[in-house]
Amino acid sequence: MSTTSPNVLLVFPKFSPNSFWNLQAVCDVWGARCPAPPLGLITLAALLPSSWNLRLVNRNAEELTDADLAWADLVMTGGMLPQYNDAQVIIEMCKTRGKPVVVGGPDAMSRPDVYRHADFLVLGEAEGLIDQFVAAWSAGATTGVFEGEKFQADVSKSPTPRFDLLNFKHYLYIGVQFSRGCPFNCEFCDIIELYGRVPRAKTNEQMLTEIDTLYRLGRRGHVDFVDDNLIGNKKALKRFLPALIAWQKEHSYPFRFSTEASMNLADDTELLRMLREANFFLIFVGIESPDTSTLISMQKKQNTRRSLADSVHRIYQAGMVVIAGFIVGFDNETASVAEGMADCIEATSIPVCMVGLLTALPNTQLTRRLEKEGRVLPVTPSDGDQCTGGLNFITLRERRDVLADFRAVLKTIYDPVAYFERVRTVGRMLDRPVLPHLFSASNAWHDVKAFARLIRCMTFRRTDLRPHFWRTVIDCLRNKPRNIETVLGNCAFYLHLGSFAQFLIADLDRKIEALDDEATRQPQLRKVAQTA
Ligand code: B12
Ligand code: SF4
């Protein structure tokens, strides 16, 4: 049924719980339900006609009820690969109730075929493209596939996402986006296939309106710039940061920011200074491997010709803590990979490291090469993430050795002694700026409650962590008390990471044992290479 003001239900599918990013234990401490809101769906919402009635259900934070579906004339859903299973459940729920369903978002862009049974498919960034769907729907269409030209969406025309559809209390942090795309060319990366290699940035006015909207809606605290690489277009960023700094100063710094950036950030002192002044406190960096030849073979040259430890420490000195991504399973890795990676993590003293297995994501240079080499396995990495899944191809080294090396890294770096030692080192090295803060009683009360929950948990529930936690807190208070917020955040992270690492290690033990039994042994590449 199409009307001029249909009821449209936007539904964000559930993530698999088996993920590095699940962070449920951290959410429990913070009083949130899940880490982040669906920025894609609320951006889409802002692009739909203003006469349409919209509601949002994030299945990671709330139930999708029969009453919600009964209300809807149209359901719009979609997300990323690990949401595939639940997206199928949502499509099925709509089908059985006769509700038309539209699917879009990154997974549908990468693998449209697995969503063909939806009534409508919108494949591409919604800016511009969604108008074609709206016109078709309004004219009475009941099915259709709409495809946008790649990398052409003009983000400088993106409207402010409908942050008003969110319940901020459900989330650890709220996302905003300044740019899409990344200029680098890492072989395994899907971002450059989905969003291109020429970063497209919003204008200062757009970004400040977004920040201002969040402020007016009462949001304070952690805001994440979800950019693929915030420094992908340095010129645009250097134009924007002074405006952001001025806004923060004018409003007494209501926000602290995190983002993702490439390692060459460490080379630009001006940029580091600006990010510090804008109150960026956390940067996710893809280090991937400490081994230069591995980095060169994966086309990640920006991480070579540098001391990784010096680069990371420069970021600490600018007041930002680093979270890093590492990958095990590259073709020209050697048997020393586990030792090299664990040493690198210790030398850089990065507490939170997402160490995962190489995953051939759909539509990447890596997948295309492995397909040519006849090495892709017929499994789709659709559940979990690269920690629980991954290695969906025939490895060059013995598969059991790759898994054993992955296990060895996890065992070393997530041992509580090693983890909390890194947190203490960061607590001493980090140079958080002292910025003027406007006191807000309700925020302060929220923080006090979260702190009390963390202390209770670390002291009475996780008695195994008690000595590590208190030693770390006291160390920070003695040496650099202004870093205490970051230190506590990293301690809280361990509530998830420690158990997640144990879960992964047990899972790897089973997999390694199965391979040792030779029941599921992979054919070795040498055989494949001979027959290819
Ligand atoms: C922030 C982010 C996260 C956050 C979580 C975000 C959240 N809401 O919970 C975190 C850090 C937890 C995360 C984790 C992961 N992520 Co992630 N993530 C992103 C990132 C950087 C930004 C997402 C975003 O907000 N984009 C901004 C919005 C505006 O863009 P968008 O979502 O594409 O939406 C636009 C269109 O797609 C479209 N659209 C979106 N939905 C819909 C729905 C309909 C019906 C329609 C019509 C249109 C439409 O309209 C929007 C406007 O144009 C993207 C990269 C990117 N540039 O998007 C990766 C990305 C989505 N993640 C990805 C992956 C693989 C993962 C991980 C598996 C591994 C990893 N990279 O760590 C994990 C798994 C998480 C888990 N819990 O299991 C891939 C997905 C690939 C795929 N084909 O599905 C991406 C594309 C890139 C990448 N490799 O990181 N991620
Ligand atoms: S730096 Fe990151 S976003 Fe850019 S191409 Fe490499 S992996 Fe992709």
Image (cartoon, helix red, strand yellow):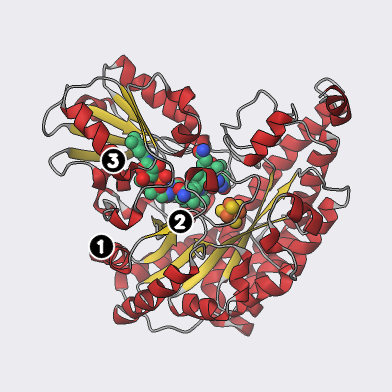
Q: Position of residue 380 (x, y in %)?
A: 60, 28
Q: Earlier in the sequence, mark 1 or mark 3?
A: 3
Question: Residue at position x 40%, y 56% from top?
Answer: 175
Determine whether 186 is above or below 78 in the image: below
Q: Amino acid at mark 2?
A: Val
Residue where numbered disc 1 is placed: 213
Q: Residue at x 44, y 60 (%)?
A: 224
Answer with the quarter of the image where residue 245 lies. bottom left
Mark closer to the observer (1, 3): 1
Q: Which element is circle 2 on?
A: loop
In this rendering, would 322 be left or right of 64? right
Residue denoted by label 2: 226
**CA–CA distance between discs 3 and 2?**
20 Å
Position of residue 430 measured from the top left corner of the image (x, y, whole percent)? 61, 77
- Residues at discs 3 and 2 in contact (Cβ within 8 Å): no
Q: Earlier in the sequence, mark 2 or mark 1?
A: 1
Which mark is on residue 306? Answer: none
Position of the N terminus, as image quadrant, is top left
Q: Are marks 2 and 1 in contact (CB under 8 Å)?
A: no
Query: Would the CB of label 2 be found within 8 Å of ligand 1?
Result: yes
Which residue is labeled 3 in the image? 56
Label 3 SS: strand
Mark 1 Cα within 10 Å, few/some/many (few <14, many 20+)?
some
Report the side of 441 relative to 311 (left or right): left
Residue depicted at x 81% and y 55%: 293
Contact flag, marks 1 and 3 (Cβ < 8 Å):
no
* Displayed quadrant of residue 464: bottom right
Could you classify mark 2 by the number of other residues whose Cα lies within 10 Å: few (under 14), some (14-19), or many (20 or more)? Answer: some
Query: Would the CB of label 3 be found within 8 Å of ligand 1?
Result: no
